[in-house]
Amino acid sequence: MTRSISSIFTLFLWYHTVADLREDLKYIWSVDEPSCNFNYTQLNTKTIKHFPQCQMVYGIIVINQNSNLTASQIEKAFSNMFYFVGGIRIENTKFTSLSFLQKLYFTWYCRNHGLYVQNNAFLTNASTLQGVDIILADSSDECTVVMENNTKLDTDGLCSEGYLSDLMSIQVKGNLKDCGCRTPTCDNLYGGLSISNSTVPPTVSDIHTIREHLVIENTNLQNLSIFKNLKFLKSNTVDGFVLDIKDNPQMTRLAFPVLEVIKNAKKDDGYTYINLENLHPDFCLTQSEFGIFENSDVTFHNLDAKLCDSAEEIEGLCHFKSMKELPNNCATVIGDIKIGPGDEEHVTKLLNMFSLYGSLEIRETSLQNLSFLYSIMNIYSLGDSPVIQIIGNRNLTQPTFGIVTRVYTRYSREAIIQDNHPDIFNSTDGVCDVFGIIPLEKMMFQRRLNYTGSDCESSTEEDNDNGRAQNNHVSFKYQHNAQCSFEDVYRKIF
């Protein structure tokens, strides 16, 4: 492969040693499609003639003061490229914009490489980077993105919009205007924020976005109303906590004034974990706060909380006293639902129930199925009762119900299924699971229950293991097919 002295020297400045360079390039150039390798590094009038006209290109591209190319020439060379595997360095150029990266969908896979935009004295517009999707191939860390010493460039929009806004550790300094900071003195905070031992920075009221995590522990705070302008909590983690609030004995409310979104850029690969632990015994969450958690698809590590009492009248909100007294068309029910003998004629009142704040008990009825729970999606079991009890329903042969996506619990995740029809789980191939088996591993985890009772004991452990193994297998196939282009890249490069 052709490598000029100037190209090696340029990359020598980029990495610490030529040995490191060769090791990094080995990952890029060891692919099954050599015709799609860019076998140079310096992009200039000579090497641009050899730029591959492939949809997926592999290489390391250096565009600098020696490139002697116009933006339109580079844009034309890149016109067929939708995926790029490697790294790009743009430095010491006279470009006023990065228009040559203006593909609407331009996905970038990196390992030890990334994007460097440095020392471009005339650069005023880098908005095309908002359409670049930068993906790390093989770890939960991020690709390196550096925007430094571009003295006419306002980078503020790059941190708040587009794909780069999901990064937790973008390095930005020395530009006309830098976005974000790593101390709580600006509205866009990188690196997370930890508050402990009652040391609350006076400037937290100005923070609009916190990236990585927010930890509040061992304080005397009663709520988090100090974060007057905090709208976004963003993370990029597979299994770390985005919000960790623990050991605050006086805290009775969350009460973020304007919080809208808790976002994990790796939500498809991991979980958006929240921990609410060891707070005041009366600590509670409102339905609106639970709504934020629903929309943000969070998973609780601990949920030491009650549901706040509210006098507000909400359409479709019902408080459970008995099935007979329950109104029709309840979208949300608060209370432990108990369905017993004689309640069969009232169960259609639950057809439109979307959320349940409480537990569900169905005992000694003549019901043959639970289709009246068709609409339920969310269960918040914040008491100490089992989440679900289905006991003594001798005619029940169809036990699965709803389109449940998550079960939030304060205590155990217990479900008791016993003394029902002997063939209760025939319809689920012997698997003891009232929500059914679906090819979505994350949802299966979020709605998991610990099933006990004689009906689950008769549903053999082998049946349950096989059912869940089948789900895991289907889930893997589903994810693989959905991300086949990513897998192709990983297999070829990494």
Image (tube, helix red, strand yellow):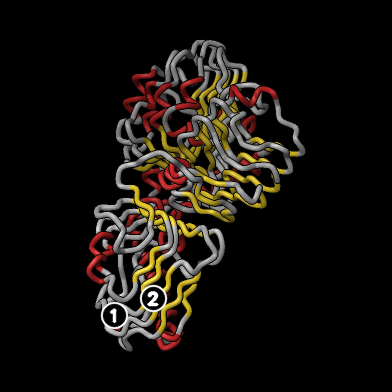
In the image, residue 58 above or below residue 407: above
Q: Nearer the viewer, residue 115 or 194?
A: 194
Q: Position of residue 464 (x, y in %)?
A: 42, 80
List the residue tagged with mark 2. Answer: 390
In the image, residue 77 above or below residue 443: above
Mark 2–mark 1 Cα distance, whole angstroms, equals 9 Å
Q: At numbered mark 1, what does the secondary structure look like: helix, strand or loop?
A: loop
Q: Residue at x 25, y 59 (%)?
A: 349
Q: Residue at x 42, y 47 (%)?
A: 294
Relative to 26, 47 lies left or right: left
N-terminal label among 2 and 1: 2
The kind of residue on which mark 1 rests is Leu
The kind of residue on which mark 2 rests is Ile
Q: How many marks?
A: 2
Q: Position of residue 396 (x, y in %)?
A: 29, 80
In the image, residue 19 above or below residue 435: above
List the residue tagged with mark 1. Answer: 396
